[in-house]
Image (cartoon, grey):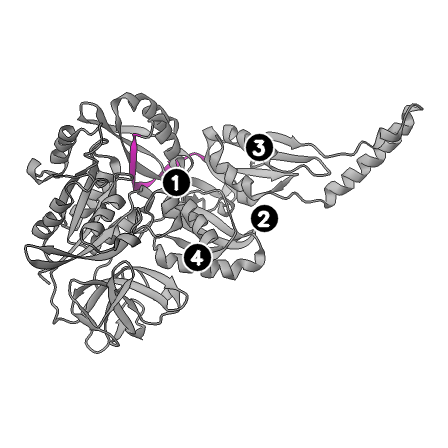
């Protein structure tokens, strides 16, 4: 055990985690040159296309240091705020963390958030200053920021360039010398923490675990504590680039177990694995329950695919424990699921993965947050969906969730960012100058205001420099109304939103204009209306496609033309009664990108 080191790499998005992981794997000769490609641990096509890490990935490396062979278990983590749950799970399985900071950009919001998570778990922090080969690197300024933040010596900061390989040897020796070996007793009863799992259509569910205490052998009889189900450990092993089977794993090891589990609900992230004959006294305290922030309905395009969609989401949930879902139905879209996500990027990625990995075509409704409604009878109802709102005269008050958001930016963008946050009903709580030209702004604002395009706007007004992190505080009173969209007098419940009264008129008008562009013309007029209760606040009309029935009339009396037009008008009227309006999928997505 003295020769094992478990560590993860944490950083803000785009500070070079995956590239650094590539260099470490190259240096320790974990992968052959012919297998090498950039972002080698990002094994999803989606991750490569977007250049972001979505899943944390574990891999074992062997490193020879002063004649002794060490086993280094690395977990590479995502940097985007929407995947912070992945980071917290990785941190729970490690003793140390490489905190990677970009020498050209300095400390950003996610750097601080991830650092606090690591410190909560008493991890040994090794600060790494990356991108030292860049012409615009400012090592001395960023080192001052790191010393202020972490409280380490300047000599502890390792200067590297993940691109050129500079300083990678120093990182490896720092991992061996500064990160403590894992604790735990190999002779004690087995206690292993499940930190991830994937579904394999041939082998069933493969769970990734970190052994805290005890030893596990192939074919041992084990049980998962929270469900109580018992299994045979058909295959255990360590995670190299591919799975590498072993006969025995003991305390401190990170590995995988295949036990023929077929039902996804039987494997839970954060659960404990133990022996059936000699069980441990108590399960490991897993990670905190994840709180979804954004809710949206997902419906199959074809109603017959409801069960397929359920099994696809269950399999995705194995691989992404922060996804939660419950069945729901909608008048416009039939049966589907109400899913909870950590943010809009998370929602987009889940939708994309359903399409690519499971071939599921889904319609996603307008995302919203969960509101708390107090009725005149004294009941408290959690409303995730505008259609679940009680009648207006039964509502005493509505409360919405508020967050504390931290924005770190260059001082020249402070005015524009303040305007953006105040427009979104934010209140400035604090403003701290971290250095001469870097400011940390703290706002209190409603979560529903950042669900839409807040993040994109923040990036564009700060030319990509501002970084954003938030945490949930409490529910507060809100002046909210339900905005309904009606097509030919019929409400489309999938397009309803709960919105702040002051923004309702503007939002309703923009929705109507956008839908007018997207809804194809029919043989009859389509009235698109935005309404609050019985009051119509905006209207647009999609004009009918009509044939020129008077083309055959040349000359003669006007009554001949009138007769033909009246006949056409009657036909249109009848058609309007029996015709229905098809709302294309783009219309549901367009609401997210109204500007």
Name the residue that disc number 1 marks: 399
Q: Nearer the viewer, mark 1 or mark 2?
A: 2
Name the residue that disc number 3 marks: 512
The reply to whether the magenta stretch includes residue 469 is yes
Instruction: Give the spatial CA distance, label 1 vs label 3.
Output: 27 Å
Q: Nearer the viewer, mark 4 or mark 2?
A: 4
In this view, which residue lies farthest toward the right? 556
Q: Tag 4's secondary structure? A: helix
Name the residue that disc number 4 marks: 313
Mark 3 surroundings within 10 Å by alpha-carbon count, few (fewer than 14), some (14 through 19), many (20 or more): many
* Residue contact at pointers 4 and 1, CB within 8 angstroms: no
User: What residue lies at 75% left-to-right and 42% top-to-bottom?
Assistant: 575
* Residue contact at pointers 2 and 3, CB within 8 angstroms: no
Q: Nearer the viewer, mark 3 or mark 4?
A: 4
The reply to whether the magenta stretch includes residue 28 is no
Q: Which range is magenta?
A: 465-480
* Residue contact at pointers 1 and 2, CB within 8 angstroms: no
Q: Is residue 284 left or right of residue 484?
A: left
Any mark on residue 332, and which? 2
């Amino acid at each position: 055990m003295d020769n094992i080191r478990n560590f993860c790499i944490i950083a803000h998005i785009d500070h070079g985690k995956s590239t650094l992981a590539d260099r470490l794997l190259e240096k320790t000769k974990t992968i052959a040159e012919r297998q090498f490609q950039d972002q080698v641990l990002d094994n999803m096509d989606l991750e490569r296309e977007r250049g972001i890490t979505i899943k944390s990935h574990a891999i074992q490396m062997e490193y020879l240091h002063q004649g002794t062979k060490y086993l280094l278990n690395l977990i590479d983590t995502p940097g985007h705020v929407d995947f912070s749950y992945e980071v917290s799970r990785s941190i729970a399985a490690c003793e140390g963390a490489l905190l990677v900071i970009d020498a050209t950009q300095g400390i950003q919001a996610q750097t601080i958030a991830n650092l606090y998570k690591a410190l909560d778990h008493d991890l040994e922090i090794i600060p790494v200053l990356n991108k030292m080969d860049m012409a615009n690197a400012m090592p001395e300024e960023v080192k001052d920021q790191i010393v202020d933040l972490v409280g380490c010596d300047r000599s502890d900061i390792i200067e590297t360039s993940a691109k050129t390989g500079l300083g990678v040897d120093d990182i490896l020796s720092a991992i061996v010398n500064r990160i403590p070996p894992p604790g735990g007793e190999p002779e004690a009863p087995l206690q292993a923490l499940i930190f991830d799992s994937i579904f394999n259509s041939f082998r069933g569910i493969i769970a990734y675990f970190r052994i805290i205490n005890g030893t596990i052998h192939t074919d041992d009889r084990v049980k998962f504590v929270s469900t109580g189900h018992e299994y045979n450990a058909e295959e255990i092993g360590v995670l190299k680039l591919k799975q590498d089977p072993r006969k025995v794993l003991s305390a401190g090891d990170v590995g995988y177990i295949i036990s023929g589990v077929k039902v996804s609900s039987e494997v839970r992230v954060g659960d404990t694995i133990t022996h059936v004959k000699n069980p441990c006294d108590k399960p490991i305290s897993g990670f905190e329950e994840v709180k979804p922030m954004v809710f949206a309905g997902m419906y199959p395009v074809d109603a017959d695919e409801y069960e397929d969609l359920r099994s696809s989401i269950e399999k995705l949930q194995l691989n992404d424990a922060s996804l939660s879902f419950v069945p729901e139905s909608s008048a416009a879209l039939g049966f589907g699921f109400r899913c909870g996500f950590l943010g809009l990027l998370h929602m987009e990625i889940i939708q994309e993965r359903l399409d690519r990995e499971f071939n599921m075509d889904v319609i996603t409704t307008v995302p919203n947050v969960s509101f708390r409604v107090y009725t005149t009878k004294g009941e408290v109802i959690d409303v995730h969906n505008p259609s679940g709102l009680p009648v207006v005269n039964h509502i005493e008050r509505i409360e919405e969730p508020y967050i504390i958001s931290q924005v770190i930016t260059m001082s020249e963008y402070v005015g524009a960012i303040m305007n953006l946050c105040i427009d979104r009903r934010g209140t400035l709580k604090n403003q701290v100058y971290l250095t001469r030209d870097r400011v940390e702004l703290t706002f209190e604002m409603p979560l529903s205001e950042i669900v839409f395009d807040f993040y994109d706007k923040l990036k564009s007004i700060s030319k990509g420099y501002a970084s954003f992190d938030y945490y949930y505080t409490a529910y507060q009173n809100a002046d909210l109304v339900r905005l309904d969209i009606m097509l030919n007098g019929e409400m489309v419940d999938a397009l309803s939103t709960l919105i702040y009264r002051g923004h309702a008129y503007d939002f309703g008008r923009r929705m109507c204009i956008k839908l007018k562009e997207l809804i194809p013309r029919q043989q009859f007029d389509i009235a698109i209306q935005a309404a609050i209760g019985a009051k119509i606040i905006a209207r647009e009309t999609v004009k009918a496609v009509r044939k020129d029935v008077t083309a055959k009339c040349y000359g003669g009396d006007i009554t001949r033309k009138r007769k033909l037009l009246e006949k056409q008008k009657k036909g249109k009227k009848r058609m309007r009664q029996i015709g229905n309006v098809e709302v294309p999928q783009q219309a549901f997505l367009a609401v997210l990108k109204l500007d």
